[in-house]
Amino acid sequence: MATIRMAEAHGKREDEVSEKRVEKSRTFLNLVASRYSPAAPLELEIAYKAFKEATGASEGKGAAIMAHMIAVISPDVLAETGDPRDPNNPKVQALFEQAQAWARSEFGEESLIAARLDVDEKGAGVVDLFVCPTAMQSGGRGRKPKLTISVKSGLEAVAKKYPIPPNEDGTPVLNKYGRPKKKRNYSALQDSWGDWASQHIDQRLRRGDPKKDTQRKHVHADLLRERAEELDRRERAIEEKERNTAAIVRAIGKDEIRLSFQGGKHKTATSTALSEERRAALKQMVRSLPSDTRSILAEVTELKLDATATKEAAQESGHDAILKAMQSGAEAFYRREVIGAEEAPETGWRINYSDQITERRRGVLSAILEPFRLVVAPFIAAIARAVRRWDVTAKEVADERNDSGWDYGPGL
């Protein structure tokens, strides 16, 4: 009963966990249902006692009195018909109804005590089911059989419907004692829910891969949430660094700002032709960057000054083309169209283009960058060195988030 009360407290958002991860302004939108306590479906203890009174079921000595099951489908399926956290989304409603129908189908019409689908948390596609399977238990010594709550019997009944497939030659799979191997009860439950979700919610849904096949280790949802939030923070910080670095590179190209490293100190000078607001904004961008990045940008400034010196021996249009090439090179690098530049003893400077861009786009970039490769390539290499000094790039963070090691098939 203590565990039932804890589950009830969480449903009411009265526990410590709810304080950390629940958006309480949305709690009233949660979907809840209970045939035994329809007016107050979150009152799990009251519903359980009403179930016992209605059915006459008794508790087995030392046995579990309720099963808490979590029926899950991919939020991507819900998103096809609207917000996966919108209780009015047709597929969200279908999930809630079909999860209850599945529980009643597997464990008996009267077995489902209560159900809840939360939309006030960050996740979606999850239904909490509170179930009391029953079975007739022999009285013994002349006593009459009685209806008893038996979670174990309910699970075993499901397992019988989903046996382990035989070997290729038709013989049964044996355990280490030489007897036919039985599927774990909870594995069979996932088979059952996967079949039901596919037939009644979306035919594309499939049961998730078994743990024994994937070798994945369970990670608590709170740890995943903290990891995701940390990745979000890192990604935002990295994106800000990239934006500021790119903005300073453009400002250097326009002669709005000059960075230098003199006497062991970084120095920043801004053009007096700029407004006070613009000068202050540029200086703030520089201050937000790490020291090593400012050192690289000082190198970029020197490259720009070298390019300006080259202008004196060329026409004005040539100088403009150099600036355009430098700015285009920086922008292409931050768009991952150019992935870096390197200097080889035999061939000199070379610009490395991403193999993900089209030939047409590569041709356009080459026409802009290659005529000024001796200036643009070391310029790109300097930016790349700055990025490499950060712990992780935004692209790597994105890749890591998209390859979390989880599959979002139906499961419990």
Image: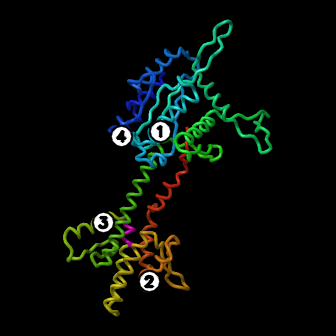
Q: Is residue 77 above or below residue 146?
A: below
Nearest to the eye among marks 2 and 3: give it.
2
Identify the residue at image location x=34%, y=37%. Answer: 24
Q: Residue at x 35, y 81 (%)?
A: 323
- Measure the C-alpha gap from mark 1 to mark 4: 23 Å
Residue indicated by mark 4? 23
Q: Left or right of 25: which side holds 214?
A: right
Q: Nearer the viewer, mark 1 or mark 2?
A: 1
Mark sitting earlier along the chain (1/4) = 4
Instruction: Report the amino acid beneath label 4.
Output: Glu
Between marks 3 and 1, how big is the CA–CA gap?
Answer: 50 Å
- Mark 1 vs mark 4: in front: 1
Q: Earlier in the sequence, mark 1 or mark 2?
A: 1
Tell me residue 303's x, y (percent): 38, 81
Q: Within 10 angstroms of label 2, few (less than 14), some, or many (20 or more) residues?
A: few
Q: Which mark is residue 285?
A: 3
Element under disc 2: helix
The residue nearer to you, when weighing 74 against 372, is: 74
Q: What secondary structure is found at the residue carrying circle 4?
A: loop
Report how far apart the C-alphas of labels 2 and 3 lie in the structure. Answer: 31 Å
Query: Residue sitting at 58 percent across and 17 percent down?
Result: 148
Residue at the location (38% across, 58% down)?
237
Residue 295 within the segment the image draws in magenta = yes
Q: Specify the amino acid type for callout 2.
A: Ala
Q: Secondary structure at mark 3?
A: helix
Residue 154 picture quarter? top right
Residue position marked by numbered label 2 in the rendering: 367
Of badges 3 and 1, the one in the foreground is 1
Give the magenta part as a residue range.
290-296
